[in-house]
Amino acid sequence: MAHLDKTYPGLSIKRQCDALSLNRSSLYYQAKDDSDNDEILLNQIRDIWEKWPFYGYRRIHIILIKQGLIVNRKRVQQLMKEAGIQAIYPCPNTSANIKEHRKYPYLLKNIDLIRPNQVWATDITYIKLPTGFVYLVAILDVFSRRILSWRLSNSLSTIFCLEALNEALETYGAPEIFNSDQGAQFTSDEWIYSLLNWGIKPSMTGVGRCLDNIHQERFWRTLKYENTYIYGYEDMGDARLKIGNFIEFYNHERPHQSLDYHTPEELFRVDCIKGVQADCVETPILTLEELPSLEHNLTVNFNKNLELISLI
């Protein structure tokens, strides 16, 4: 097979190229080091993903194009896959409902928030660990944005939500209204009975209406962007420690723009000192030991309470 010889004395390189039908410029082409290019591109991908961790490869590809980089979308996808970079989005469904459970109307539409312990809210979010998902429930005072209690669990059982509820009620008394989504944990007989037992009006957001529980959603965003995504959690114990430290900081030290740069604790405690906080209903709550036999207790009194609430 004929080939070009740059050292052949009888023919110039030009005449050899003409004889072999070769483009002379191809002789001077030097292939770029793909590994170096991939490393540079991956760093740019990481920069974009760290700023917007909910972006997948399609959106990241668009940002790279807008930055003036010519790159194939499949190449971006492949590099992200090799580096273990993926969009952060709600994989587990933390708000699955059960059709048989009773639902309650949303009571916060036209309400004026004037004091702590007027309205509480709760929600469940997922936390990703190297070994899988765990779930975090938090109870928030809507007026002051203070986190009153929280629990971490490796399952979406009702029991860890009830533990958080019992702690908040024992510590701070009862609010007038308690808002949640229509997840199975918050429509369960155990949860509803606990609220009614304390004289609390249940309120539930509409399906798909996350803005009905906007203060809780903002707290999840704050927690994840200011703690979870920055530090990461090695395991359940590490997550519990770091989340606990962050909530302590969030309640006592972090000023909130929406609170005129006061902390939640300042707003919660100042009104308590002034005596503005509502009187708590001194009603005993269900203990965790009583929960297994709860079905036997949901008799005539429970049904009457449901009828009264439905009239509100």
Image: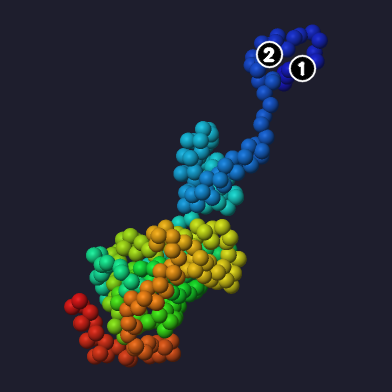
Q: Position of residue 178 (x, y in %)?
A: 32, 74
Q: Please indicate, yes or no, whether residue 78 appears anywhere in the rendered image.
A: no
Question: Mark 1 or mark 2: which comes first in sequence?
Answer: 1
Within 10 Å of disc 1 (Cα), the crowding (few <14, some 14-19, many 20+) is: few
* Relative vertical location of residue 210 with respect to residue 136 in this rendering, above or below: above
Where in the figure is residue 118, as x and y percent of width and height? 32, 74
Please identify the residue farthest to the front as the structure is shown. 274
Asked where in the image residue 259 lies, by quadrant, the reply is bottom left
The kind of residue on which mark 1 rests is Asp
Q: Is residue 28 visible?
A: yes
239 horizontally vs 291: left or right:
right
Percent x, y of residue 139: 41, 72
Task: Quickly name the residue at label 2.
Answer: 17
Q: Nearer the viewer, residue 268 or 78?
A: 268
Q: Amino acid at mark 2?
A: Cys
Number of numbered discs on residues: 2
Q: Quadrant of the C terminus?
A: bottom left
Q: What mark, if any, has residue 5 been given in the picture?
A: 1
Task: Decide: is 188 above or below 300.
Answer: above
Mark 2, Cα crowd under 10 Å, few <14 / some 14-19 / many 20+, is: some
